[in-house]
Image: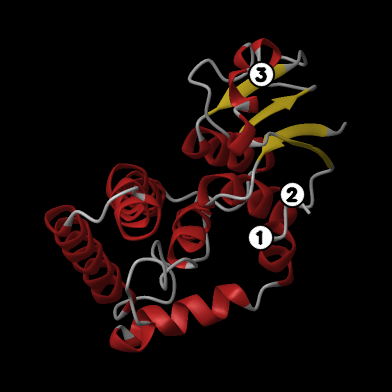
Amino acid sequence: MTIELYTWSTPNGRKASIALEELGLAYRVHPIDIGKDEQFAPEFLKISPNNKIPAIVDPQGPDGEPIPVFESGAILIYLAEKTGRLMPQDPRARYTALQWLMWQMGGFGPMLGQAHHFRRFAKEQIPYAIERYTNETRRLYGVLDKRLKETDYVAGDYSIADIAIFPWAARHEWQGIDLADFPALKRWYDAIAARPAVQKGMAVPG
């Protein structure tokens, strides 16, 4: 059964496509051009009521019936649980993966997104905002680098937590970050960037 993926070329969108590629699941891409406000289309809002990408529809949900899933973190958990992969089975390791996933959802994504906005897209340069979000971004990179000095991947083995974090780190130049300042993180970044499934997922939608 083919999963329907509604997405655009953003870090959050790429989480879903990377996971689908890593898991080898068949999927069909429906580009939602957020630059043209396509995320507000009534048909899309039936799937993603918060008008955000990505979203999926799995025609074969847990009860055998179609299920829509929105929010990138929820999609990653859903796909991991559907396949029994990319999520540790050991309870302690599972909660480690979930903690780092929530760290990305609550901090590493939103703060880096604000850095993107004020550094690149704001109609006027606001020094206070640029400094605030750039500094917080750098602090978060330091948290991640410290963790990756202890382990190859954030939860021990490669997991949905790494998949969630990577596409945001892929825009480090937008954030004023030099990965050479974070050696453990750079080692992790290069290892993930070399994965064929990641390369394919990062190119969605083509």
- Residue at the spot 40% in from the left edge and 52% down from the top edge: 121
Task: Check disc 2 and report the residue beneath it.
Answer: 205
Q: Position of residue 12 (x, y in %)?
A: 52, 46
Q: How many C-alpha atoms fall within 10 Å of the one at disc 3: few (<14), some, or many (≥20)?
A: some
In the image, is residue 110 above or below residue 141? above
Q: Amino acid at mark 2?
A: Pro
**Which of the 4 image quadrants contains residue 1?**
top right
Q: Is residue 82 above or below residue 13?
A: above
How far apart are the alpha carbons under marks 1 and 2? 8 Å
Q: Amino acid at mark 1?
A: Met
Please provide percent x and percent y for residue 198.
66, 64
- In the structure shown, which secondary structural element does the residue marked by tag 2 occupy? loop
Mark 1 near mark 2, Cβ–Cβ under 8 Å? no
Q: Quadrant of the C terminus?
A: bottom right
Residue located 15% across and 62% down the image: 131
Asked if the residues shown at circle 3 and circle 1 are in contact, with their CB atoms under 8 angstroms apart, the answer is no
Alpha-carbon distance for marks 2 and 3? 17 Å
Q: Which mark is residue 44?
A: 3
Q: Position of residue 19 (x, y in %)?
A: 64, 51
| Residue in the picture at 43% in, 77% down | 152
Q: Which mark is residue 202?
A: 1
Q: Nearer the viewer, residue 137 or 96?
A: 137
Q: Quadrant of residue 5?
A: top right
Residue at the limit of the structure toward the front, as seen here? 124
